[in-house]
Image (cartoon, rainbow, N blue to C red):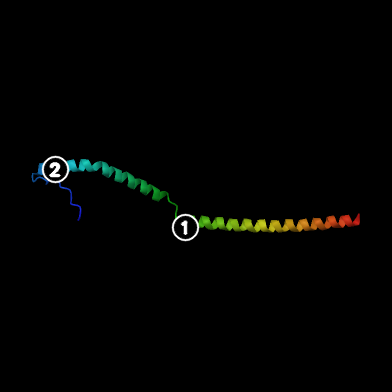
C-alpha cells in the first residue's frame, strides 16, 4: 500500500491571509534554497576548474613521447657501455699477453 501524502491545512481564500501563508512557506523554504544555491555554485566552480579532455590527452601524449625518447637513450647508452666494457676487456687481455 502506498504511503499517504501528509495532511496540510487548506490555504485561505482571503488574499491577505494567502499572502501571509505564502510568505511563511517561503521563509521556511529559504534555508533549503540557500543550501541548494551554494551547492550548485560549488559544482559549477568544480566544472570550471576541470581541465579539458583534449589538453589532458595532449599532456599524456607528450609524456609518452618523452618516455619513449628516454628509453631509447637509455638503451643506446647501455649498448655503448657494454661495447666499451668488451673493448676494455679485450685491451686488458692483449696487454696481459704482451707482458
Q: Position of residue 94 (x, y in %)?
A: 86, 57
Q: Position of residue 55 (x, y in %)?
A: 48, 55
**Of residues 48 and 40, the one drawn nearer to the viewer in this rendering:** 40
Q: Residue at x 85, y 57 (%)?
A: 93
Q: Quadrant of the C terminus?
A: bottom right
Q: Residue at x 26, y 41 (%)?
A: 31
Q: Residues within 10 Å of mark 2 (few under 14, many from 20)?
A: few
Residue 35 figure quarter: top left
Which numbered disc covers residue 70? none
Residue 38 figure quarter: top left
**Of residues 3 and 29, the one drawn nearer to the viewer in this rendering:** 3
Callout 1: helix, strand or loop?
A: helix
**Of residues 79 and 15, the one drawn nearer to the viewer in this rendering:** 79
* Callouts 1 and 2 close, C-beta under 8 Å: no
Callout 2: helix, strand or loop?
A: helix
Which numbered disc covers residue 54? 1
Q: Residues within 10 Å of mark 1 (few under 14, many from 20)?
A: few
Q: Which residue is mark 2?
A: 19
Q: Residue at x 82, y 58 (%)?
A: 90
| Left-right relation of 99 to 30 | right
Q: Quadrant of the N terminus?
A: bottom left
The residue lying furthest to the front in this view is 1
Q: Position of residue 14 (x, y in %)?
A: 8, 44
| Left-right relation of 61 to 22 | right
Q: Residue at x 40, y 48 (%)?
A: 46
Sequence-first tag of 1 and 2:
2
Q: From mark 1 to mark 2, how far is it between C-alphas?
A: 53 Å
Circle count:
2
Residue 87 figure quarter: bottom right
Q: Position of residue 54 (x, y in %)?
A: 47, 57
| Left-right relation of 32 to 77 | left
Amino acid at each position: 500500500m502506498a504511503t499517504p501524502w501528509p495532511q496540510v491545512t487548506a490555504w485561505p481564500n482571503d488574499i491577505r491571509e494567502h499572502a501571509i501563508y505564502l510568505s511563511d512557506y517561503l521563509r521556511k523554504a529559504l534555508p533549503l534554497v540557500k543550501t541548494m544555491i551554494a551547492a550548485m555554485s560549488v559544482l559549477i566552480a568544480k566544472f570550471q576548474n576541470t581541465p579539458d579532455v583534449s589538453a589532458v590527452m595532449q599532456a599524456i601524449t607528450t609524456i609518452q613521447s618523452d618516455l619513449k625518447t628516454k628509453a631509447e637513450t637509455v638503451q643506446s647508452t647501455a649498448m655503448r657501455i657494454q661495447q666499451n666494457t668488451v673493448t676494455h676487456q679485450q685491451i686488458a687481455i692483449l696487454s696481459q699477453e704482451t707482458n
